[in-house]
Image (tube, rainbow, N blue to C red):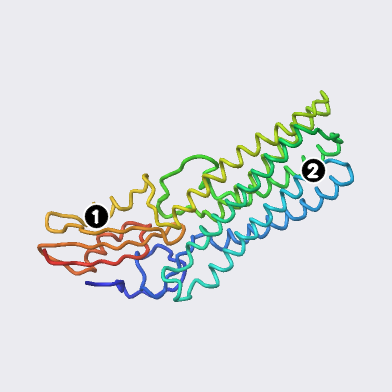
Amino acid sequence: MSHDHPHGHHHGHDHHHDQPFEPAHSHVFLGERHDRNARRTMLVIALTTAMMVIEIVAGTIYGSMALVADGWHMSTHAAAMLIAALAYVFARRQAHNPRFTFGTGKVGDLAAFASAVILAIVAIYIGWESVARLMNPVAISFREAAIIAVVGLAVNLASAWLLHDGGHHGHGHDHDHAHGHGHGHDNNLRAAYVHVLADALTSVLAIFALVMGAIYGLQWIDPAMGIVGAVVIARWSWTLIRDAGRVLVDYVPSGEDLPDEIREAVETDRDVITDLHVWQVGPGHHAAIVALKSSAPATPESYKSKLAHIHDLSHVTIEVQPA
């Protein structure tokens, strides 16, 4: 029976994948773009907060409840992104704390889960507010409100560009294959990105509603677009709650092929896997416990070398029993 001291390399940093496994005491299972993502999240918070203040002030001056609501709604996104930023800082600071048995790679998923819950509350609030507006319409200064909404949209698009992670996002798409070898979904970044996207969506819908209102005098389009936005945001929030929640409870999604890859690499006529556990410990990092029965037992190291080509495996424990 052996635990994890395979190759003796000790570089206590970031798990660049030049060798597969590290000694047990140096787990840093942070995503490979951790620090870049942290910096960009901070920048987006600054942008969002500035825009939020402008919208609340302008909305109050022009009597546009839609703008004031969007401003306060932006404040919830700023708060959610602050959760993401703090999670990055905490994960980096505590990366070498031995009390985090498998490092701090999952802190981002915890933050993403919290963020997604906030997003769901935002969706409920927008839906509620919009239904109230349908029942009791209010007068809107369409032109001024539309100008600010366009500026808001520009800020959202700039933020989305900053947070875009090269296509690793499920804005509602069911990406179940979370392995993406070498790259892991950073659910924390994705949560910040989805908040910005939700903001952009509400801006687009608000602009459409304000333009229709200005041209045709249709007051009801504004709250109707609010309801559409609420439904879409609720859908995104559910996807994020599901994906981050899966990581937190060590659920292996159906499209995840790591367990099969491990079986293929290790099992032979003589070696049979009797117990296998695989779970995610950070973006792009997985741990595995492999128990084998063998009629011709080899050293744990030789089994580990058979797994060396699987990039996502950052920590492996092998147990060998003679058959």
Q: In which image quadrant can residue 230 be found?
A: top right
Give the vertical position of 189 relative to 67 (above or below): below
Callout 2 secondary element: helix
Image position, residue 188 (x, y; %): 55, 56
Q: Residue at point 86% right, 34% down? A: 139
Tell me, for residue 257, which label it has, or none: none
Horizontal side of 301 relative to 75 (left or right) equals left
Image position, residue 311 (x, y; %): 37, 57
| Residue depth check, mark 2 versus mark 1: number of the one nearer the observer | 2
Give the vertical position of 238 relative to 92 (above or below): above
The type of residue carrying mark 2 is Leu
Question: Among all residues in the image, which is located at the extreme right?
Answer: 61
Quadrant of the image for the N terminus?
A: bottom left
Q: Residue at point 55% right, 42% down? A: 171
Give the vertical position of 30 relative to 182 (above or below): below
**Among the two numbered marks 2 and 1 on one chain, the one whose residue lies closer to the N terminus:** 2
Image position, residue 35 (x, y; %): 57, 63
Callout 1 secondary element: helix
Q: Are marks 2 and 1 in contact (CB under 8 Å)?
A: no
Label tally: 2
> How dense is the environment of label 2, judged by Cα within 10 Å: few (below 14), some, or many (20 and up)?
many
Horizontal side of 123 relative to 209 (left or right) equals left
Quadrant of the image for the C terminus?
A: bottom left
Horizontal side of 96 relative to 128 (left or right) equals left
Question: Among all residues in the image, which is located at the extreme top?
Answer: 216
Q: In which image quadrant can residue 64 be found?
A: top right
Give the vertical position of 319 relative to 260 (above or below): below
The type of residue carrying mark 1 is Ala
Task: Report the residue marked by disc 1.
Answer: 265
Task: Report the residue marked by disc 2.
Answer: 67
> How dense is the environment of label 1, judged by Cα within 10 Å: few (below 14), some, or many (20 and up)?
some
Distance from Cα at disc 2 to Cα at disc 1: 58 Å
